[in-house]
Structure formats: structure tokens, C-alpha cells
Image: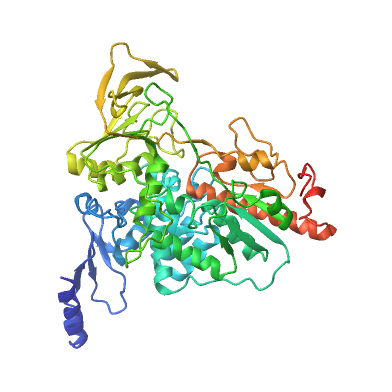
Amino acid sequence: MMRRAVQKLAAARHAPRAARRQQPLRAFSEKHETWRDENDTDNLPKVRKRDGTMADLDRTRGFVDYNRIPDAYRDPLERVQDWAEINTAGHDPVERRVQAARCMDCGTPFCQTHTGCPVNNLIPEWNELVFKEQWKEAYDRLSKTNNFPEFTGRVCPAPCEGACVAGLIDKPVTIKNMEYAIIDRAFEEGWVVPRIPEKRTGMSVAVVGSGPAGLAAADELNQMGHTVTVFEREDRVGGLLMYGIPNMKLDKSKVDRRVELLEAEGIEFQCNADVGGTDGVDVHTLRGNYDAIVLAIGATMPRDLPIPGREGDAGGVHFAMEFLTANQKRLLMTHEGNFESAWDGSFVSAEGKDVIVIGGGDTGTDCIGTSMRHRCKSIVNFELMPRPPDTRAVGNEWPQWPKVFGVDYGHAEVQSVFGEDPRTYAVLTKEFTRDEDGKLTGLITQDVSVEGGQINTVEGSEREWRADLVILAMGFVSPEQYIAEQLNLDTDARNNIAAEYGEYSSSLEGVFAAGDCRRGQSLVVWAINEGRGAAEKCDSYLRAVAARGTDAGAGVAMVGYSAPQDF
């Protein structure tokens, strides 16, 4: 259809002017019928509006005239056959502009406030620039607030869309799709290039942890002119971006691409460097060799399920990160068949097994999607709370995040393959069952009801479920404690490193904390927010130290610091 339209246009250019006025050009975008008018100066496509009429593409009433059409995922039956990203190539140029036109350019854009985007992305501005086809300028605006839009554009649940003003009366703007469309275009066009700092301050910072918080802090501090070294205990940089989020949500080549840019900008990465760990990097030595430290070690202590049948080393029950990390390391092979990761051969396979995933959320969905690609025999997902409502409940008004029922990619894949949604709501796991050899055979649950915020078990509702593999995806409780203990850092009631939000200073001068290790388990975009904020406060500290001529690296002189005698 489009080829014929182009041929008509070429013919019309050679036709008499009078004839041209009788030959409007008709074509189709992916979702919208479009026209080119007979007027030589009319370059705007005409698109079909909600009411069925054809008119120039216009953003004045875009949120009224056009429907929300998000980028589609690949077909579930196709994508479960591989580990490639679930995203399609996205909309064609006309449809992308139609979706940008739906942005209302509100007087108060809640999408970029504290109720929406944690990094305060300039969403209305880059939506308008996409509509005007000023993609380079859109990228410039996006990169001012977000260090890694190629990550958030794929894995963020988009709280900005939950706070979108258009969502108050209709469906929100496709903000998340717009974000990764902009950054993908920027990489394709070669606009994303290393930014080499012009001057160096002579101050050095050690960033411990290379997840989104650590990378954001390192990026900001490096651009401020400080010399930054990132220490990562795994064999590859990226933290949960590399090993916690499966490849079908975030292809690891995108993580490597960004890391290579950061290296080109002057950041040094040291992998297999477990700061404070046995046979790792001595934390006191680190403290003495750097002017400041930013801890971005994440919240990696998983929530366990201490019920009968879980005791000892009994097999068949695994934490989500154990399952996902080993799988991702196994996948990281070169084209020649050599492993790019330090995979030790351990691997939890769901192939041919009855799988139960306990816990919902993004991690639970990732475990479902991974099990589907292993060719599991069956899969069930338990959630403790009742099924969410289809629309916002009382007390969950806009612009709060909508706590409503949804179907994520893993759920859709199970529906397509097995014919039903895998989720079972309002169930409490009571016991793991095993045979005489200790092999896992299943588990026993009991239904629950929630009244007045209290969870109550339902008498006589016990059920037994068959399972060869149970995956615990119930979240994370805190960071591991060995660094905080060795540095005598204060922790809060949840064992997170104590540091006030917005200040990020720990109880030890010159040591800052950011991301999940400070705030608890949260989103990638919040980790970026905290990494940026911690970098700003760290920079202020270093400048103050330089101004008063104090050696920030002399650990024994720092307030609250007590080094070992042999230091």
C-alpha cells in the first residue's frame, strides 16, 4: 500500500498543477489511516480521529482526538521460544507522533513530580519535541534528568503514567514507550558519545556496587571531575541490571554498551572485587585510599519462608535471585560457545517440572517468564493478598500509583501456552511436603481473608499442590551487613544503612549510601534518583574538604571512624 502511495506521489510531481489538486495521497501507518492533501505546502499527515473523521495531525486536542496505543510486545507464542527482548520494533513515525500528540502539556505535569517520575524527567517537553520531529533536542532534554533511559524505558513500571493527567479521564500517554524510542533513536543516530570531563579535581571516589544507583553516582561524580573507581563483586558490571533482570526484559548488550561508554569517559571498573568480603577488598584499605566512598550495594538479603519442610539443605526450594542469576550467567556465551561469565555450572532448571512461584511483583513475573522458556510442565503463582480491583479503589485515587489488576508479560505467556492465568490469590503457604528421601513433592496452602488490614486464615480451606520446584520471590529485607559492621555504620530498624534521604551521609564522615541499601527494595528509577543525589552530596563534601585543606582519605582523622590497630 505504501509503495503504491509513493508511486502516486512521484507521478503527481510530473502532472499538471490542476491535475495534482485532484489526487490526494492516501496511505496507512501501522494504526492510522493517513492522507496527504493536494496543497503543495501541506506536509502534515491526515489521520483518522476517534470520531471517524480525517484531519491534520494536531496536538491541540490530541488527548481527546486520539486513542492510546502502546507499543506491542512480540507474540507470546513466539517470544517463549527464545531469550530475545519481548519488545517489538515499535510504532512507525506517524503513530509515534500521534501518541506524542496525546500529551496535554498540563499546567501542572504530575507525571514529572514526586507522584510520578522519581528522576523528574521533562516529559511534556520531550513529548512536544517528538511531535515536532526534533529528536535530537528530545534526547538532549531526556539526558538532562536520566542517566540511563535505555534501562528505565524497558524495565520501569512507569509511575509517570500512573500520575499522567490524561489518565484522570482517559488512558495515560505512552510515556515509557516514548522514552525508549528517544534513546534508541539517539543510539542509532550516533548522538550518544563519550563525554570526557575537561578538568579533574584531583579527588578520588570509590563506588561500591555497580547496579543502577552505583552507576548513576559514578556517572555524575565523573562528570563533576572526580576520579571514580567502581567495585563490583560479580564477574560483570551491572548489578541487578546484568543478573537480576532477565534478558527478555533487558538485553545485556544494552548494559554492556552503557558500561563501555562510562569506561570511555574515564570511570574504572573492578569486577570480582568483594569489598569487605572474605578474600575480597579490605574495606579499611579502601577507606584509606579514597577521598570518599559511595555505598550502593543494594538490598540482597531475600525474604525466606521458614515453614515445615524448609529446614536444612532440603532441595527443590530456591530464592528468585539464585534462579535468575544462574540462568543469566549460563546464557552469556560468545558466538564461539565460550562463556563470557564466571558460570560455575550451577543451574536451577524448570524444564519438565511443576513450578510454583511464591510472590508476585516484577521478580515473580521474571521467574514465570524464565520458567516458561525452560519448558516447565506447569506453573502456578501464589499471591498472599486478594486479587486487585479492575479500577482504582477508594483511597487509591489519582495521581497515586494505580493498584489495579493487570496482565504482565509472564502472565500473558502462561495464558497463551496453558490457557489460563497462573495467579492464585489470597493463599498462605503452610508447609513444603517431601517424600521419604527428602525430595520436594509439593506444598500445602490455606486461603486467607483480609479484613481491616489484618490477614486471617480461612478454616477448612487447606489445599495440597504438586510441585517439583518452588521459587521464593517474596522480596528483599535488607542489604548484607558485613560492610556496615566493619565500618561501624548506623543502621535503621530494617537493617538498611542509616542515611537521611536527600543527604545520603552515613554515620561515618565521607561515606555515603544510595539506592536499595539505604531506602530498601525499590525501583530502578528510584536507584538512579538516589545515585544522582548521593553524587551531588558527595561532591559538596569533597569541595568542602578541599576548601579547608583536609585530607579526606586519612580514615583515622574522620569523625566517628575507628580503624584497626594494624591499619
Residue 43 is left or right of residue 161, and the answer is: left
Please state the horizontal and vertical placement of residue 174, each as a whole percent of the image: 37, 53
In the rendered image, which quarter is residue 85 located in?
A: bottom left
> Residue at position x 49%, y 67% from top?
260
Q: Quick one: 272 or 449, which is closer to the camera?
A: 272
Residue 251 appears anywhere in the view? yes
On screen, residue 119 above or below 489: below
> Looking at this rendering, what residue extends furthest in the top direction?
459
On screen, residue 564 above or below 288: above
Please state the horizontal and vertical placement of residue 297, each as a whole percent of the image: 56, 47
Please state the horizontal and vertical placement of residue 244, each as a whole percent of the image: 43, 48
On screen, residue 113 above or below 454: below
> Residue at position x 39%, y 26% from top?
310
Tally of numbered discs: 0
> Looking at this rendering, what residue extends furthest in the right direction?
548
Q: What colour scheme governs how the chains and residues are painted in the rendered image of this protein?
A: rainbow
Residue 174 appears anywhere in the view? no
Assign the N terminus to one quadrant of the image.
bottom left
On screen, residue 210 above or below 402: below
Please state the horizontal and vertical placement of residue 169, each as a whole percent of the image: 37, 42
Residue 158 is left or right of residue 215, and the answer is: left
> Looking at this rendering, what residue extends furthest in the front direction?
437
